[in-house]
Amino acid sequence: MSHPVDIHVGKKLKQLRVLRGMTQTEVAQGLNISFQQVQKYELGRNRISASKLFEISQILGVAPSYFFEGLDETASSNEMLDDEATKIASMLTRIKDERLRGQIRTFISELASTGAPAR
């Protein structure tokens, strides 16, 4: 059974990788490991060593502490939000037209700021 911290770190890795528009293969090449190993990290099946986490941080342009942010928060509701945010980020990065992506970000921002009720 995977440790909750390993699962959390793996989810943060996947979210950031998707936000950066990178594939598991691209991250793996930067780390000189297989994409399957990156997949295991993202699923929390394999624990990431401190040195490997440092390398990942450099590749993705964040401090190593990024991967531990939010550990103290309630897991269930945050996991659902994290999964949803990852899906949205993945879809957004596939849109090649920067102007259209900007319009979508503006639209989402406006919806979020108004607190529009769900239908």
Image (cartoon, rainbow, N blue to C red):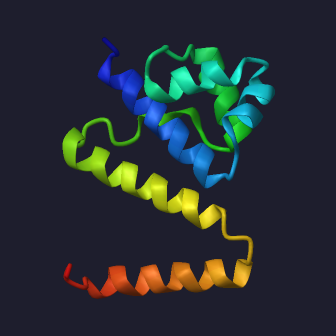
The part of the image, by quadrant, that contains residue 113 is bottom left
Residue at 74% in and 71% down: 96
Q: Is residue 74 visible?
A: no
Q: Where, quadrant-wise, is the C terminus in this rendering?
A: bottom left
Q: Is residue 55 left or right of residue 13?
A: right
- Estimate the x, y position of residue 116 in percent, counting from the top left: 25, 85
> Relative to 91, is 77 above or below?
above
Provide residue 11's location: percent of width, then percent of height: 44, 37
Relative side of 33 to 112, left or right: right
Residue shown at the point (68%, 42%) measured from the top left: 60
Q: What x and y, as percent, mark residue 1?
A: 30, 11
Is residue 22 toward the left or the right of residue 7 in the image? right
Q: Is residue 101 above or below residue 65?
A: below
Residue 17, can we see it?
yes
Q: Nearer the viewer, residue 62 or 47?
A: 47
Q: How many marks?
A: 0
Q: Nearer the viewer, residue 113 or 28?
A: 28
* Nearer to me, 96 or 103: 96
63 horizontally vs 69: left or right: right
Residue for point 54% across, 17% down: 48
Query: Where does the image place residue 93, in percent across and percent down from the top left?
Result: 64, 62
In this rendering, is residue 20 above or below 93? above
